[in-house]
Image (cartoon, helix red, strand yellow):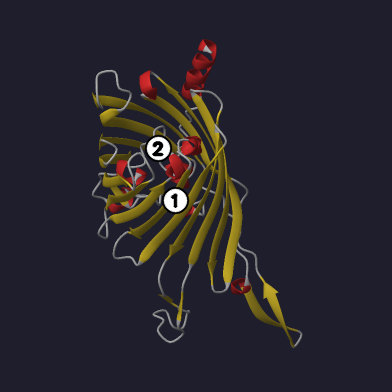
Amino acid sequence: MKNLKYTFLLSLVCTIAWAGNRDRVGQAGASELLINPWAQSSGMASAGLASTNGLEAMNLNVAGLTKINKTELLFSRTDWLRGSDININAFGLAQKLGESGALGIGIMSMSFGDIPVTTVNLPEGGKLGTFSPQYLNLGVSYARNFSDNISAGITVRMISEQIANANARGTSLDAGIRYVTGPLDRVKFGIALRNVGPKMEYAGDGFSIKANIEDEEFTLETRSQAFELPAVLAIGASYDFHLGMAGEEGAAEPTQIITAAGSFTSNSFGKDQIAIGAEYGFKKMVFVRAGYLYEDGVASSNAQDLTNAFSGPTAGLSLSMPFVKDGPRIGLDYSYRATKSFDGTHSIGLRINI
């Protein structure tokens, strides 16, 4: 086991790939795969790659899915870039399988409101009605504890993007591993590879044109350029500080926990990102979070240096109460992510743990 620990820690170091490339920003599609729709983990700037448990781990490191009691239900509503009329709804269900496994299903739907139809002759629109783009992702995850220290998981995600007369569909694969050690599993390390899959391509009636050939009218279909998925490799670590123990001396449950977390994300089609975050929890009932997401140029006042709508700071709050003592719990989550434009991104979530 000791050699296994050293091998795992060595792999954490060796797999860091500084693949971020600002020259490739915007060359990938399906960028909604990079969005964390959940209210709890986004309050720490998604720095909890190694510490996030349950359904929210499906969007960071799926290996954390195993850390549920029995059943977890989660719903989140995000006002994305408030003032832009973009909304995100996310729903998830996770179920424990046996002693060491867990199965999770997560759905994320992104709507953009009604957009006026425009043409070359009517660039302002207004006479041709509106259309409503819809993005939908459906992920199915399985994670398993392989020992008291190591867990791993995989997610298969179906991707759909569509408007009235064009659509694109694809699949992606996520994989993650997590290692915990120390008293009460205070130290955690994680690695996640996300959004790996074949290229996607748009098709539909929107790519059809009518043409006259030898006085006969034909419908010709043009091809769109295929695009790659925004693959990322992320590595993270966290540490829990226990400030008090419940009940008498020697009790196993801490009353207050401060979690410090950090992660590095290497984007194949964008700048590398570093996220740091902290969470304070009191008696598993009140949680306060803050974080910061850094990438090159994030603090610049020059719009040409920006490739991300976010300006860095994040914050969050959660309240969790049991239905009965030591029984199922219901929780309410909120997060705020500061942005350069608009009025920030606000997420609110409801969770039930059984």
- Residue 200 in view (yes/no): no
Instruction: Specify the label residue 354 is tagged with.
Output: none
Instruction: Specify the label residue 52 is tagged with.
Output: 2
The extreme front residue here reads 324
Q: Position of residue 271 (x, y in %)?
A: 40, 41
- Which tag, 1 or 2, sits closer to the chain's start? 2
Judge left or right: residue 101 versus residue 9. Answer: right
- Nearer to me, 62 or 344: 62
Residue drawn 47% across the image and 19% down it: 9
Q: Position of residue 154 (x, y in %)?
A: 57, 39
Judge left or right: residue 241 versus residue 224. Answer: left
Badge 1 density bin: few <14, some 14–19, many ≥20, Cα 10 Å: many
Residue drawn 51% across the image and 60% down it: 136
Q: Report, in whole angstroms, how far the alpha carbon at label 1 lies from the one at label 2.
A: 15 Å
Number of numbered labels in the structure image: 2
SS class, disc 2: loop
Identify the amino acid type marked 2: Thr
SS class, disc 1: strand
Q: Position of residue 334 (x, y in %)?
A: 29, 51
Closer to viewer: mark 1 or mark 2: 1
Instruction: Specify the label residue 73 is tagged with.
Output: 1
- Residue 85 in view (yes/no): yes
Above or below, 159 against 103 in this view is below
Identify the amino acid type marked 1: Leu
The quadrant of the rendering that contains the C terminus is top left
Residue drawn 58% across the image and 66% down it: 167
Q: Position of residue 51 (x, y in %)?
A: 39, 33
